[in-house]
Image (cartoon, helix red, strand yellow):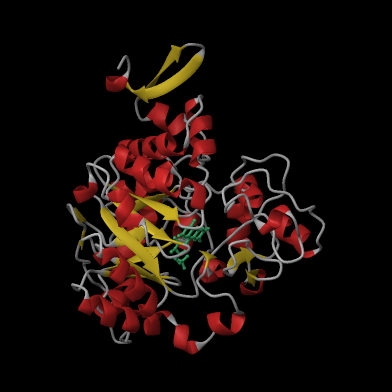
């Protein structure tokens, strides 16, 4: 599928959304919890790509950043507004995981309230997405984009979505080299050549052709400009990349996480299965993650006090530590939002190729193969719950009933 003798220099065509076009067809993939922070998504949008937030645990993150309590819907709206503010007119998406079941609907509607351009949804089949979105007045302005890992999954989604009169505006095809959760439950399946990204893309092209030929976006293991050229020449409308964006100053990962990203070797990257994620899908981790090490030794007592993955009150890691570990606690620790727990680092298969942390601007230039002019200042490293970048970009603070609220100057007193 992907041709070897591609033109090494190529100006990429824009990626058409339902409304408007993303000038550079590079989607910075959603990375929860708090890794694809508003600073990262805003910077990517500013450089012409699609900057994507993650809805996971935004209630906690945005409440900290804004100094008052936000529920899931309000938090999603605010995160989108903050990223759009830093994005200076660029396009912003929201990644919403089906597995975060309790907040799914609020996250969809809140993102739409906030002005999101696209909702990208996977970690399960997003069957109900159009039903929820079509209740919103902005339904016709927001692209609905499922993430799949097979042609069959896309077929099932299209059949269901058709009943609502809305088909996908594009589809992301995620292969087994991606970071975070991958679609497979067993190592033999994840490493089966039949499941290589190019083979999954071939299946998905076939299905997409029968349902209106919407754009197909490839994800998982895409690392260089040349990879993107080959992907686009194979018929894809764009790429979604996670690991490269994780290794930027603007991402929400903490310093230890970023240092480990630079230092890690291929052997340090592992697909966690037993114990693994309570979602049941394989979860790619950095083996030296302190939380993972603790989980391998079954030293962490089963405990879930966060509840994002609770399905009807149940998450296996609440009761046992033999088969699963509590990803919510480990992931929150790696963005400095959970002092009492050790840190859990997820990465893509290509993490060992990262040799330094760079700015989003430099990365976007490298990926497009265009000259990069050094910024006057290295972008500041901040976590997703830090408000400093908003204040520096022009938000003002205002004391209301003992709380310090921050908002764009024009919005104060409203
Ligand atoms: C650290 C990290 C966290 C991720 N978290 C999520 C997530 O919360 N939801 C999701 O749908 N995908 C998630 N992903 C997948 C990315 O959005 C993207 O599709 C994938 O990483 C692409 O592969 P690459 O890392 O090789 O570029 C994550 C990836 C990484 C690296």
Against 192, residue 224 (above or below) is above
Please name whichever residue, 78 or 21, is drawn nearer the observer in this view of the structure: 78
Q: Is residue 62 left or right of residue 289?
A: left
Q: Quadrant of the C terminus?
A: top left
Q: Quadrant of residue 242?
A: bottom left
Marker count (numbered): 0
Question: Residue 267's x, y, as percent?
Answer: 66, 74
Closer to the camera in the image, 323 or 179: 323
Relative to the observer, which residue lies in front, 383 or 30? 30
Q: Is residue 367 visible?
A: yes
- Find residue 42 and report its horizontal and vertical position in percent: 36, 44
Kindly identify the residue that appears in the image at 62 percent across and 64 percent down: 285
* Residue 334 image offset from top left, x and y in percent: 62, 48
* 320 lies left or right of 182: right
Q: Is residue 373 visible?
A: no
As displayed, is residue 273 above or below residue 311?
below
Above/below status of 45 relative to 401: below
Q: In terms of depth relative to the viewer, which is nearer, 54 or 2?
A: 54
- Residue 48 position in % (x across, y down): 26, 52
For the point 74% across and 55% down, which residue is it?
Answer: 319
Measuring 53% from the left and 31% from the top, which residue is drawn there?
64
**Is 196 placed above or below 328 here?**
below
User: Image quadrant for the N terminus?
Assistant: bottom left
């Amino acid at each position: 599928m992907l041709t070897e003798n591609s033109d090494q220099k190529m100006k990429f065509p824009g990626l058409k959304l339902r409304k408007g076009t993303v000038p550079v067809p590079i989607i910075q993939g959603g990375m929860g919890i708090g890794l694809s922070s508003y600073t990262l998504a805003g910077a990517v949008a500013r450089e012409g790509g699609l900057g994507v937030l993650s809805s996971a645990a935004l209630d906690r993150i945005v409440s900290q950043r804004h100094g008052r309590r936000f529920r899931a819907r309000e938090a999603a709206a605010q995160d989108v507004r903050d990223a759009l503010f830093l994005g200076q007119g660029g396009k912003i998406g929201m990644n919403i995981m089906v597995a975060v079941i309790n907040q799914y609907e609020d996250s969809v509607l809140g993102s739409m309230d906030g002005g999101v351009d696209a909702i990208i949804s996977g970690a399960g089949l997003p069957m109900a997405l159009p039903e929820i979105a079509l209740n919103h007045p902005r339904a016709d302005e927001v692209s609905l984009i499922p993430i799949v890992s097979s042609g069959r999954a896309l077929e099932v989604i299209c059949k269901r979505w058709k009943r609502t009169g809305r088909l996908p505006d594009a589809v992301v095809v995620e292969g087994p080299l991606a970071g975070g959760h991958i679609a497979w439950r067993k190592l033999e399946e994840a490493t089966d050549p039949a499941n290589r990204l190019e083979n999954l893309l071939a299946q998905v092209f076939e299905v997409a052709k029968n349902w209106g030929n919407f754009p197909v976006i490839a994800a998982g293991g895409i690392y260089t400009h040349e990879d993107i050229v080959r992907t686009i020449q194979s018929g894809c409308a764009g790429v979604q990349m996670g690991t490269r964006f994780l290794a930027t100053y603007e991402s929400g990962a903490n310093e230890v996480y970023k240092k480990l990203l630079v230092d890690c070797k291929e052997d340090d990257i592992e697909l966690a299965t037993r114990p693994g994620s309570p979602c049941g899908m394989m979860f790619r981790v950095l083996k030296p993650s302190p939380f993972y090490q603790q989980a391998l030794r079954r030293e962490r007592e089963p405990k879930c006090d966060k509840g994002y993955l609770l399905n009807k009150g149940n998450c296996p890691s609440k009761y046992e530590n033999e088969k699963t570990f509590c990803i919510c606690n480990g992931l929150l620790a790696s963005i400095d939002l959970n002092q009492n727990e050790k840190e859990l680092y997820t990465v893509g298969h290509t993490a060992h190729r990262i040799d330094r942390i760079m700015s989003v601007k430099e990365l976007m230039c490298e990926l497009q193969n265009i000259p990069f002019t050094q910024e006057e200042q290295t972008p500041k490293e901040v976590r997703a719950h830090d408000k400093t970048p908003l204040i520096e970009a022009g938000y003002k603070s205002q004391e209301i009933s003992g709380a310090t609220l921050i908002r764009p100057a024009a919005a104060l007193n409203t």
